[in-house]
Image (tube, rainbow, N blue to C red):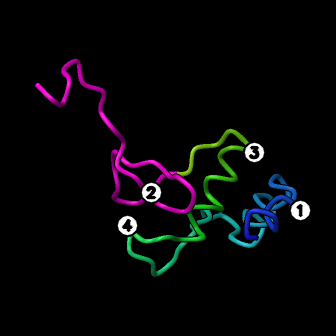
Amino acid sequence: MYQEQLSELNPKNVVEHLNFITGDFEPVLMCHCAKTKFCHRHLVAQWLEKELGINIMEFNVIDFERKQGYLKKKSVPSLFNEED
């Protein structure tokens, strides 16, 4: 349902509005969710990245990616089979 609401918005207008209301400061999306819990902020960030090709960084979080409202640790490919 939240994705449907986002799809009705123009992402470029959203970013322009955020830049307007923050003036000379970089916009920051914030929440109180734990980083391993579902968060609507991740959906917004993922949507903006996909639609506008911009990179939205997580503060003090490395080696993670957003997936469907969650932060997931990036998997590191291995040359070895886990069964070995």
| Mark 2 vs 3, N-terminal side | 3
Q: Position of residue 45 (x, y in %)?
A: 61, 57
| Mark 1 vs 4, N-terminal side | 1
Left or right: residue 73 compared with residue 48: left
The residue sitting at the left extreme is 84
Give the Cα distance between marks 1 and 4: 28 Å
- Say the numbered circle drawn on residue 58: 2
Query: Mark 4–mark 3 contact, CB under 8 Å?
Result: no
Q: Could you tell me the amino acid type at mark 1?
A: Glu
Secondary structure of the residue carrying numbered label 2:
loop
- Say the numbered circle drawn on residue 51: 3
Q: Residues within 10 Å of mark 3 (few under 14, many from 20)?
A: few
- Say the numbered circle drawn on residue 8: 1
Residue drawn 57% across and 44% down?
55
- Say the numbered circle drawn on residue 36: 4
Give the Cα distance between marks 2 and 3: 18 Å
Q: Could you tell me the amino acid type at mark 4?
A: Thr
Left or right: residue 27 compared with residue 35: right
Residue drawn 74% across and 43% down?
52
Give the Cα distance between marks 4 and 3: 24 Å
Q: Could you tell me the amino acid type at mark 3?
A: Glu
Q: Position of residue 9 (x, y in %)?
A: 86, 62
Q: Residues within 10 Å of mark 2 (few under 14, many from 20)?
A: some
Q: Could you tell me the amino acid type at mark 2?
A: Glu
- Say the numbered circle drawn on residue 60: none
Q: Quadrant of residue 24?
A: bottom right
The magenta-colored residue range is 57-84
Q: Residues within 10 Å of mark 4 (few under 14, many from 20)?
A: few
Q: Is residue 66 magenta?
A: yes
